[in-house]
């Protein structure tokens, strides 16, 4: 029956798209996907033996059964039409390289659950790998992974929607019976919002990405400087550092995620979706203009550079010259303990920068999300996996470089950092946990990211010596063009 529904749905979809033709041209492309040659042969025989009218009539009869949930078992204890469950069947998990330790830890903790690990780019291509791969599998009606980790926060928007041929979307609803509400309540307030569509949770947040201000206490003491608390003081420190200690820096603009740090963290209304299907961007806003002027001034005096934080050049040139920088809490492991290999006892953590006289407003720089597939044939194993990788000490505390979204794990992660004596200030735990609740709500999640327009317009412009202020109108235009392409009304 499962094959019949998939086959007839595809045949009906083909007839709608190509009237008078009953044969589909869709073919699977993923390695390991079911061999469809027998299916194609069957379709050819069906086309020779029956008329298109008969195909339509038969299709309608079978589709009536499929539409009631026959294809995937109807409503279930999980709160959605689940696939027929196969006990002890393996689960396929897609992760990026940084999340491989999560899978390894799970396999050690649950050796009886068979996990097939597949590493991909983590959806670093934005609208690329995750969505495009799943789209091909939707067309083929087969081959879906059971769990996917994505570095992007906007995937729930498309993954929750029905496919063009009427099938349910890839992502399984999690709060309608699948995951216990008591477990969901353990996540930090607001951390599941980006994966929640119309009250339904479609993904579990792996880590939070609130911004703070990191500083090198050793260098500040050597130079006699104080930690800045406002954007204005940050700019003043840049002028002083450039004049007195040229070659030392306060950050980089070489990565497209700087949009979240400098514009989200400065309350600049550049990327807003005030209601569904509506987009608003205003780079002429006072805050957007002021932060851009600060960036331009620091680029000119050399205290902001254009090398990517993740480049070998940055580590080689600035490992011992980074005096301070605004950035997400995942800089702890990814930048300081990782690429720069900054030893313990040098780095401190201060609250996010604010405007003089204004409230603290942290930026939000990512934070990956785990998705379960509604097509999985072993949902119990998927549930066990999701709960483990988001909350268990073995990964979130012991092996993750990021600040866990699960509150109890976050507390232990902070305790671990304290025990290691990595940070110089005793109150860093309070600073980081407070910042998690200070994220500015003025930026919203859409099917596209502000990073693509920044990478297309602003980064090349900066490389050619153009000021960021002068590039703002072009950045806004590109953002609005992307909104239009995605079906949004530009306000």
Image (cartoon, helix red, strand yellow):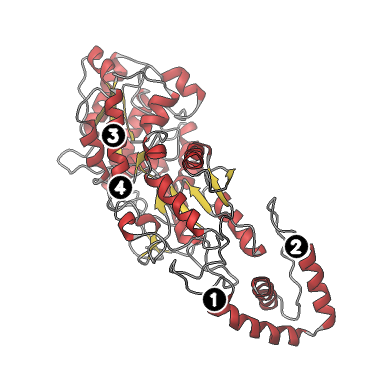
Q: Mark 2 packing: few (<14 Cα in 10 Å), some, or many (20+)?
A: some
Mark 3 lies on a secondary structure that is helix
Instruction: Return the mark for residue 468.
Output: none
Residue assigned mark 1: 69
Q: Residues within 10 Å of mark 1 (few under 14, many from 20)?
A: some
- Name the residue nearer the viewer: 431 or 391: 391
Residue 307: where, in percent of width, then height?
A: 46, 28
Vertical relation: 260 (above or below) 213: below
Classify residue 59 as left or right of residue 417.
Answer: right
| Between discs 3 and 2, the one toward the N terminus | 2
Up the image or down, 318 lies above or below 96; here it is above
Q: Which residue is mark 3?
A: 414
Q: CA distance from mark 4 to mark 1?
A: 46 Å
Q: Which residue is mark 4?
A: 268
Distance (Cα) linking label 4 and label 2:
51 Å
Residue 152 image position (x, y, % from top left):
46, 48
Cα separation, mark 1 vs mark 3, equals 46 Å
**How far across and down, in percent of the image, does residue 294 sit?**
30, 34
> Of circles 2 and 1, which is in front?
1
Q: Is residue 480 left or right of residue 327?
A: right
- For the residue pair 247 and 426, the one nearer the viewer reads as 426
Q: Which quarter of the figure has residue 176?
A: bottom left
Tags 4 and 3 touching, CB below 8 Å = no
Contact (Cβ within 8 Å) of mark 1 with mark 3:
no
Residue position marked by numbered label 2 in the rendering:
36
Q: Farthest residue toward the front?
A: 112
Q: Residue furthest top?
A: 222
Q: Please indicate, yes or no, whether residue 403 appears anywhere in the rendered image.
A: yes
Q: Secondary structure at mark 2?
A: loop
Instruction: Please identify the quadrant where the N terminus is shown.
Output: bottom right
Residue at left 47%, top 47%? 453
């Amino acid at each position: 029956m499962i094959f019949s529904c998939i086959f007839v749905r595809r045949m009906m979809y083909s007839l709608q798209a190509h009237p008078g033709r009953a044969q589909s041209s869709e073919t699977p492309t993923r390695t390991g996907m079911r061999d469809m040659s027998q299916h194609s042969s069957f379709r050819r025989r069906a086309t020779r033996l029956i008329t298109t009218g008969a195909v339509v009539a038969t299709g309608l009869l079978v589709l009536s059964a499929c539409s009631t949930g026959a294809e995937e078992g109807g409503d279930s204890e999980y709160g959605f039409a689940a696939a027929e469950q196969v006990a002890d069947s393996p689960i396929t998990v897609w992760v990026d390289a940084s999340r491989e330790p999560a899978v390894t830890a799970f396999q050690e903790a649950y050796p009886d659950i068979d996990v097939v690990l597949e590493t991909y780019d983590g959806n670093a291509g934005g609208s690329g790998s995750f969505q495009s791969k799943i789209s091909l599998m939707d067309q083929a009606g087969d081959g879906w992974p059971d769990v996917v980790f994505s570095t992007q926060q906007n995937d729930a928007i498309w993954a929750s929607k029905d496919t063009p041929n009427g099938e349910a979307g890839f992502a399984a609803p999690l709060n309608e019976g699948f995951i216990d509400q008591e477990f969901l309540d353990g996540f930090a307030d607001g951390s599941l919002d980006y994966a929640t569509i119309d009250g339904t949770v479609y993904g579990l947040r792996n880590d939070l990405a609130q911004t703070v201000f990191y500083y090198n206490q050793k260098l500040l003491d050597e130079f006699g400087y104080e930690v800045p608390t406002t954007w204005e003081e940050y700019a003043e420190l840049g002028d002083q550092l450039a004049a007195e200690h040229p070659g030392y820096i306060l950050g980089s603009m070489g990565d497209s995620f700087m949009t979240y740090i400098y514009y989200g963290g400065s309350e600049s209304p550049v990327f807003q979706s005030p209601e569904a299907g509506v987009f608003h961007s205003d780079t002429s806003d006072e805050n957007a203009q002021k932060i851009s002027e600060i960036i331009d001034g620091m680029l000119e005096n050399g205290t902001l550079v254009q090398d990517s934080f993740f480049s070998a050049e940055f580590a080689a040139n600035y490992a011992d010259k980074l005096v301070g920088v605004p950035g997400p809490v995942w800089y702890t492991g990814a930048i300081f303990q990782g690429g720069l290999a900054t030893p313990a006892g040098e780095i401190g953590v201060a609250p996010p920068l604010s405007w003089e006289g204004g409230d603290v407003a942290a930026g939000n720089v990512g934070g990956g999300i785990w998705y379960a597939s509604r097509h999985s044939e072993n949902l119990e194993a998927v549930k066990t996996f999701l709960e483990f990788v988001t909350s268990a000490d073995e990964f979130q505390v012991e092996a993750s470089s990021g600040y866990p979204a699960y509150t109890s794990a976050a507390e232990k992660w902070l305790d671990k950092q304290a025990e290691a004596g990595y940070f110089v200030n005793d109150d860093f735990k309070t600073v980081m946990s407070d910042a998690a609740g200070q994220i500015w709500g003025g930026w919203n999640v859409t099917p596209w990211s502000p990073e693509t327009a920044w990478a297309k317009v602003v980064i090349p412009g900066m490389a050619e010596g153009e000021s960021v202020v002068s590039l703002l109108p072009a950045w806004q235009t590109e953002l609005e063009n992307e909104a239009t392409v995605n079906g949004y009304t530009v306000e």
